[in-house]
């Protein structure tokens, strides 16, 4: 086949076929359109960022968060967003899995000149995933990891005094989540999962700037830019349900590449009837740790109680007693305080303290 | 080395650290080496996104395959230039060390694995029909592993 010229600049040789549009583009035009589309997601409507915001990038060392850290650094300069960027990593305590990827994040810290905070499950909950799996086995450990990670990011962000967490969730991830929420009948999450930004009263704002970025393009971007990332698979049982949704989605994409944005669009278009909305639980805060929750105890506290009691599945059941005090002798999670380190009267001082507290390990 | 955004990187952009890879540049002798008289070409194969784990944990391979292959099952006269279809099949029987279903799908590769031929998306190069030339570089990157 003769080389195809780029359909945008018409001069250089096309090297990428864009899955979303079918456009054949050269390397430079690919960087340009990819970055511009992320910028458009960021500034669309009122925009997800405010000038001067402190933004933590949830960094795992994987391709998505590494490309996010790179692209946000570039765009922050190019369009002068005025953001203060940080890297925030969670160490789940999985030997042989997180070690390499945390090394990668430390490398990224140097490459991008961004402060890094690593927060471990062990510090927060007194349990590593290795210990949890030892107790509960491989079948349900993803539930623990998912609940613990979400809270860990919020707690890390609070310690850094940041206003906003961004994650590397891409279009494929979001389409997968839409499918999973439909298959599980999780109406509440179906409504939320396609939002670029989510925020409830007491939690830290979260955004997904890669909502419309295809995984293929993220991988191509990382490859052409020679970014440092680490690919690995969790050594404990992978999320099997998501795995099936993922394979199904990839098969669909192979037949019709627009399937991914189409599914996201479907997810966005669902509207809940008033009667359904009324039936959903109102949010409150956890009586034990103060984290946002739909029950008296948040999921993390409930799971932790089960672990401490030496039960494997008890915490997965919906039965929760109403006592806010943990049984004696059990480890508990520290109170979640959105403004712990950031005294509202002297915000700058709080942030300086938080920055000083950043561990560089 | 620094990329176009001025960010210093020593990386190959393929998503593996040296600690997880054995001998990144090992020259692999093809297990089914064609006889010396036969005309062969050299192909460099690289794996990214964790895919090397299926290929004896080696991210980089140099292999030799025939320059021409028979164009149908009935005849064994090598009349047609070797193509990607042959290479993928060859890799499955000679290079793949485990979990074939994680790599192959029918004649091709599993959806979710990106293929680059001399740094170009193989979708622009004719995919399985691409006719290989001596010293072509083929990169396979999995997008199926976690981010």
Image (tube, helix red, strand yellow):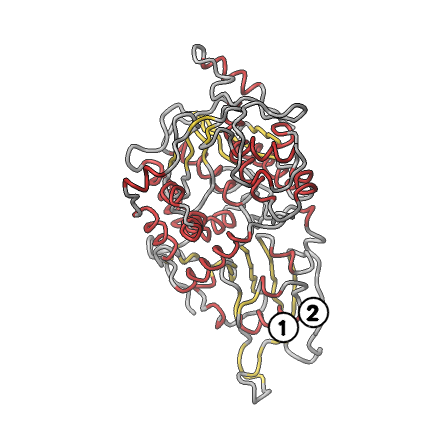
Whole-percent x and y of residue B83?
53, 73
Q: Which mark is residue A116?
A: none
Q: Which quarter of the rendered picture does the C terminus of chain A lie within?
A: top right
Whole-percent x and y of residue A38?
38, 42
- A177 horizontally vs A267: left or right: right
Whole-percent x and y of residue A47?
32, 33
C-beta proximity under 8 Å, tags 1 and 2 = yes
Query: How much space separates mark 1 and mark 2, taking CA atoms?
Result: 8 Å
Q: Which mark is residue B65?
A: 1
Residue, x 56% and y 39% (percent of image)? A60
Residue that protrudes farthest toward the bottom in the picture: B74
Q: Secondary structure at mark 1?
A: strand
Q: Secondary structure at mark 2?
A: loop
Whole-percent x and y of residue A292?
46, 28
In terms of depth relative to the viewer, which is nearer, A224 or B41? Answer: A224
Mark 2 closeness class: few <14, some 14–19, many ≥20 residues within 10 Å: some
In terms of depth relative to the viewer, which is nearer, A169 or B25? Answer: A169
Mark 1 closeness class: few <14, some 14–19, many ≥20 residues within 10 Å: many
Residue that protrudes farthest toward the top in the picture: A345
Query: Are both tags, 1 and 2, on one chain?
Result: yes
Q: Quadrant of residue A301?
A: top right
- Image height check: is A126 above or below B98? above
**Mark 2 — on which chain does it sit?**
B
Which of the two discs, 1 and 2, labels the residue nearer the N terminus?
2
- Image height check: is A82 above or below A63? above
Would you name the residue on which mark 2 appears? B30
Q: Which quarter of the rendered picture does the N terminus of chain A lie within?
A: bottom left
**Mark 1 — on which chain does it sit?**
B
């Amino acid at each position: 086949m003769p080389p195809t010229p780029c359909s945008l600049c018409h001069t250089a040789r096309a090297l990428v076929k864009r899955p979303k549009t079918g456009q054949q583009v050269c390397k430079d035009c690919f960087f340009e359109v990819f970055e511009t589309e992320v910028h458009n997601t960021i500034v669309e409507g009122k925009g997800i960022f405010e000038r001067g915001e402190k933004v933590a990038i949830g960094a795992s060392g994987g391709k998505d968060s590494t490309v996010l850290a790179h692209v946000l650094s570039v765009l922050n300069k190019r369009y002068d967003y005025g953001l203060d960027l940080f890297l925030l990593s969670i160490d789940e305590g999985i030997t042989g899995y997180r070690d390499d990827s945390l090394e990668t994040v430390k490398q990224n810290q140097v490459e991008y000149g961004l402060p890094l905070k690593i927060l471990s499950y062990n510090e927060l909950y007194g349990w590593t995933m290795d210990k949890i799996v030892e107790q509960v086995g491989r079948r349900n450990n993803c539930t623990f990891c998912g609940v613990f990670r979400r809270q860990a990011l919020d707690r890390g962000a609070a310690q850094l005094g940041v206003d906003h967490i961004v994650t590397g969730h891409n279009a494929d991830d979001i389409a997968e989540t839409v499918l999973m929420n439909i298959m599980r009948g999780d109406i509440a999450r179906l409504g939320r999962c396609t939002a670029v930004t989510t925020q409830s009263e007491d939690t830290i704002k979260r955004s997904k700037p890669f909502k419309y970025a295809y995984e293929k393009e993220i991988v191509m971007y990382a490859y052409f830019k020679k970014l440092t990332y680490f690919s690995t698979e969790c050594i404990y049982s992978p999320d099997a349900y998501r795995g099936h949704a993922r394979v199904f989605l990839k098969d669909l994409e192979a037949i019709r590449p627009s399937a991914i944005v189409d599914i996201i669009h479907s997810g966005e278009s669902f509207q809940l009837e008033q009667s359904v909305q009324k039936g959903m639980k109102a949010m409150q805060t956890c009586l034990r740790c103060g984290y946002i929750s739909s029950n008296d105890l948040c999921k993390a506290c409930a799971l932790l109680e089960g672990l401490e009691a030496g039960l494997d599945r008890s915490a997965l059941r919906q039965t929760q007693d109403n006592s806010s005090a943990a049984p004696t002798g059990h480890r508990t999670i520290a109170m979640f305080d959105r403004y712990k380190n950031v005294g509202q009267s002297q915000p700058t001082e709080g942030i300086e303290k938080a920055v000083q507290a950043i561990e560089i390990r | 080395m620094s990329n176009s955004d001025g960010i210093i990187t020593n990386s190959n952009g393929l998503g593996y650290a040296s600690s997880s890879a054995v001998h990144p540049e090992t020259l692999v002798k093809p297990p089914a080496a064609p006889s010396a008289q036969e005309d062969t070409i050299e192909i460099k194969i690289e794996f990214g996104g964790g895919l090397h784990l299926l290929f004896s944990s080696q991210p980089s391979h140099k292999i030799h395959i025939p320059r021409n292959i028979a164009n149908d099952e009935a005849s064994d006269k090598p009349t047609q230039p070797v193509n990607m279809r042959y290479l993928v099949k060859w890799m499955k029987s000679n290079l793949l060390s485990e979990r074939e279903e994680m790599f192959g799908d029918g004649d091709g590769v599993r959806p979710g694995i990106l293929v680059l031929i001399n740094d170009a998306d193989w979708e622009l190069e004719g995919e399985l029909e691409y006719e290989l030339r001596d010293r072509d570089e083929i990169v396979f990157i999995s997008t199926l592993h976690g981010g």
